[in-house]
């Protein structure tokens, strides 16, 4: 499972995007919540392999409709066989 955390520039909510890869593309979910927690919702995420950018990044939309570009490099990766979560911290 790969994870990205970012903020939506339109609704100013926090976003958590998680997905796994398959030969057909990406499947996972997008969750959003506001700072005051008044908004807490989400939706399924499906990106066909043909829609992935070179290198693996992709475009999706926040629940509010704002287009979101997701980089190819995830913020964290979990490895089920290792049972851990590897996080890349900003420098």
Image (tube, rainbow, N blue to C red):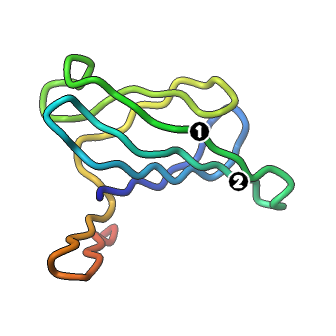
Whether tag 2 and tag 1 are in contact, CB under 8 A, the answer is: no
Q: Quadrant of the N terminus?
A: bottom left
Q: Position of residue 21 (x, y in %)?
A: 22, 44
Under circle 1, the secondary element is strand
Q: Is residue 61 above or below residue 37?
A: above
The part of the image, by quadrant, that contains residue 48 is: top left
Q: Which comes before the other along the chain, label 2 or label 1?
A: 2
Disc ID at residue 33: 2
Q: Position of residue 13 (x, y in %)?
A: 69, 47
What is the residue that sits farthest to the bottom in this orientation?
A: 83
Under circle 2, the secondary element is strand
Q: Quadrant of the C terminus?
A: bottom left
Number of callouts: 2
Q: In this rendering, would 11 be left or right of 68?
A: right
* Residue placed under numbered mark 1 in the picture: 43
Name which residue lies at 18% across and 40% down.
22
Name which residue lies at 65% across and 33% down.
63
Mark 2 and mark 1: Cα distance apart in space: 12 Å
Q: Is residue 37 above or below residue 39?
A: below
Name which residue lies at 48% across and 30% down.
68
Answer few, some or many: residues within 10 Å of disc 1's Cα (few below 14, many 20 plus, some between 14 and 19): some
Q: Position of residue 25 (x, y in %)?
A: 23, 31
Q: Is residue 1 above or below residue 81?
A: above
Name which residue lies at 23% across and 49% down.
73
Q: In this rendering, would 8 be left or right of 6?
A: right
- Of residues 83 and 10, the one drawn nearer to the viewer in this rendering: 83
Disc ID at residue 7: none
Q: In this rendering, would 56 be left or right of 18?
A: left
Of labels 2 and 1, the one closer to you: 1
């Amino acid at each position: 499972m790969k994870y990205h955390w970012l903020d939506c520039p339109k609704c100013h909510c926090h976003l958590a995007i998680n997905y796994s890869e398959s030969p057909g593309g990406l499947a996972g979910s997008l969750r959003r919540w506001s700072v005051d927690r008044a908004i807490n919702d989400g939706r399924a995420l499906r990106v066909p392999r043909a829609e992935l950018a070179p290198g693996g990044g992709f475009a999706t939309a926040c629940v509010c409709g704002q287009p979101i570009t997701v980089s190819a490099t995830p913020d964290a990766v979990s490895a089920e066989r290792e049972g851990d979560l590897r996080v890349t911290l900003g420098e």
